[in-house]
């Protein structure tokens, strides 16, 4: 007891003015680190940062030294290692260390630590960091836990018990829900009574005249001076408030087609037909919309080479091996400059939860530094994080994968509507894609119910030799497909507010440059399918009306 009292006393090493800091838990964390340095592994189960120790300079110094030593290869960290580290050009930190007990404090922390209880104390520290950050942002979270409540110690203990038993993400959700409830009650006006169907109908018609229910143009190839007028007619562009899903088997082109769409919405110029063309009529004065690409598998450099290949028209393999001509090198450099100027951002979520996805979308939409209205999420699936999150919400009751994917898809659609943003995602296919003659939502891996939440559902498939024989027999290649043999086909199985459905868009895919060029359309039974073409100019798309 004397050791704990010594370690937690404030004295000259006081906590810097924040009540949400549990010194006893911090002692256990720091002492355990010296007994088992693997707790510092940022890729492991625990993720500590200097922010967790911010209110106490001495604790922050000790943690920072240990973390830096570990990141540089040290595995058996001792007091001597810490002191040598601090003496080496860190006079301010060394002074703090000496003034607060230094080696004697660390030795006592090691004696007091119980590494077998690390998770409990880690959770306590992280929860206090969360509450501290909310407080620093100007929010009152005493309703979660009020350590200064001396009037009602029983309530204080109840709050602490609940804090200990509630997962970190759940605490954050409770706080965010309270914030969103305030917005709902104070900002969002909801008419609690029914309205007459004819109310404001004239304003709706005038709005659709001035602001048609269309969105930004997609990236599927070009016809003369326009973008893919055929695909834009099918989906009416990337419409705000909508959730599109494009599924495919591995290697067909999910990520590449999503990357192409992202570039199309964010960039001003692209290489096409041996020249740089403008994606907007007045690129110097235009405002491009912010675009965020959320990746669960590809890293930043892998996405960057996809973006560069699409913009420059240079095959990605040539970029990776640097087997390029001087002219191609110049195009790639210009594409790199285009990317530097484009409001195109990347977020990596390798082990995500539903809350992670939601927070990333909301933050990048509401933050004025990003202002993203268009989101590409690659791709819709499960992870260890989401399984743990759902299990926590369900109090340990397991949920099937289809239910989890439906939950995630539901939240994405809700976000699209709530914030009036465009979201496009993708899924893998189940084994039925090889044999099923009807390419619809039944081919989606994990949950066909995901399709219930989307506005446009498509499946990208490789063209088979049997497909080629059938379309040649029907005369499509010579007569309808400009003499070009397609190598992929896009099945449109759902099209909310659109009439083009149960059809194939046949394409030629140059996957090395992420270019997917539509050639023509048929029904699933290869009957002729006429789709009129719609030209969308990127900067002629105003704020849209419709479902918000």
Image: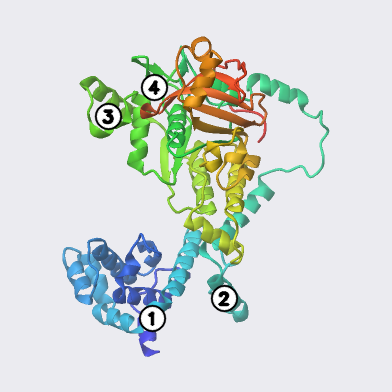
Q: Where is residue 343 in the image (x, y as percent from the top left)?
A: 42, 33
Q: Name the residue under label 3.
A: 318
Taking the image as shown, residue 162 lies to the left or right of residue 73, namely right
Q: Name the residue under label 1.
A: 114
270 or 289, which is in the foreground? 270
Q: Name the residue under label 4.
A: 269
Residue 74 visible in the current orientation: yes
Q: What distance separates the C-alpha of mark 3 from that of mark 2?
A: 59 Å
- Can you say whether 487 is above or below 530 in the image? below
Q: Which residue lies furthest to the bottom in this view?
A: 2
Q: Bin the neighbour count of mark 1 within 10 Å (Cα to Cα): few under 14, some 14-19, many 20 and up.
A: some
Label 2 or label 4, whichever comes before in sequence order: 2
460 or 267, which is in the foreground? 460
Q: What distance separates the C-alpha of mark 1 from that of mark 3?
A: 55 Å
Taking the image as shown, residue 156 lies to the left or right of residue 461, namely right
Quadrant, the N terminus: bottom left
Label 3 or label 2, whichever comes before in sequence order: 2
In terms of secondary structure, where does tag 1 sit? Answer: loop
């Amino acid at each position: 007891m004397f050791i704990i009292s010594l370690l937690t006393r404030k004295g000259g090493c006081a906590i810097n003015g924040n009540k949400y800091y549990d010194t006893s838990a911090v002692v256990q964390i720091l002492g355990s680190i010296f007994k088992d340095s693997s707790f510092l592994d940022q890729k492991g189960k625990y993720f500590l940062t200097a922010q967790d120790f911010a209110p106490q300079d001495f604790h922050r110094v000790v943690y920072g030294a240990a973390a830096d030593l570990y990141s540089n290869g040290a595995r058996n960290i001792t007091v001597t290692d810490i002191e040598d580290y601090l003496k080496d050009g860190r006079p301010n930190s060394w002074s703090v260390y000496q003034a607060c007990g230094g080696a004697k404090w660390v030795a006592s922390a090691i004696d007091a630590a119980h590494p077998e209880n690390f998770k409990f104390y880690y959770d306590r520290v992280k929860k206090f960091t969360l509450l501290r950050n909310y407080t620093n942002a100007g929010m009152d979270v005493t309703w979660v836990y009020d350590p200064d409540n001396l009037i009602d110690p029983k309530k204080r203990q109840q709050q602490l018990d609940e804090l200990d038993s509630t997962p970190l993400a759940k605490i954050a959700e409770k706080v965010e829900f309270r914030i969103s409830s305030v917005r709902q009650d104070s900002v969002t006006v909801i008419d609690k009574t029914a309205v007459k169907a004819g109310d404001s109908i004239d304003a709706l018609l005038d709005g659709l005249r001035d602001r048609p229910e269309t969105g930004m143009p997609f990236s599927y190839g070009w016809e003369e001076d326009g973008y893919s007028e055929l695909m834009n007619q099918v989906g009416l562009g990337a419409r705000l408030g909508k959730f599109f899903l494009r599924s495919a088997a591995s290697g067909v082109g999910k990520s590449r087609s999503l990357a192409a769409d992202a570039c199309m919405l964010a960039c001003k110029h692209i290489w096409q037909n041996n020249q740089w063309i403008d994606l907007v009529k007045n690129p110097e004065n235009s405002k491009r919309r912010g675009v965020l690409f959320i990746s669960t598998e590809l890293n930043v450099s892998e996405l960057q080479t996809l973006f560069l290949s699409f913009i420059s028209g240079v095959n990605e393999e040539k970029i990776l091996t640097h087997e390029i001509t001087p002219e191609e090198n110049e195009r790639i450099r210009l594409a790199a400059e285009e990317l530097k100027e484009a409001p195109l951002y990347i977020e990596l979520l390798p082990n995500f939860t539903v809350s992670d996805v939601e927070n990333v979308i909301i933050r990048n939409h509401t933050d004025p530094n990003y202002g993203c209205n268009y989101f590409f999420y690659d791709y819709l699936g499960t992870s260890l994080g989401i399984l743990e999150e759902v299990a926590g919400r369900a109090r340990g009751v397991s949920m099937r994968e289809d239910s989890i994917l439906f939950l995630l898809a539901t939240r994405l659609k809700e976000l699209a509507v709530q914030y009036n943003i465009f979201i496009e995602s993708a899924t893998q296919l189940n084994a039925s894609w090889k044999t099923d003659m009807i390419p619809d939502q039944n081919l989606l891996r994990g949950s066909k119910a995901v399709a219930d939440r989307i506005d446009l559902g498509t499946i990208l498939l490789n063209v088979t030799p049997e497909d080629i024989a059938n379309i040649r027999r029907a005369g499509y290649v010579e007569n309808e497909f400009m003499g070009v043999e397609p190598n992929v086909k896009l099945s449109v199985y759902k099209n909310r507010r659109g009439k083009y459905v149960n059809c194939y868009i046949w394409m030629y895919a140059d996957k090395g440059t992420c270019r997917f060029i539509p050639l023509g359309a048929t029904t699933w039974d290869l009957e002729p399918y006429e789709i009129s073409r719609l030209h969308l100019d990127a900067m002629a798309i105003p704020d849209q009306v419709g479902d918000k």
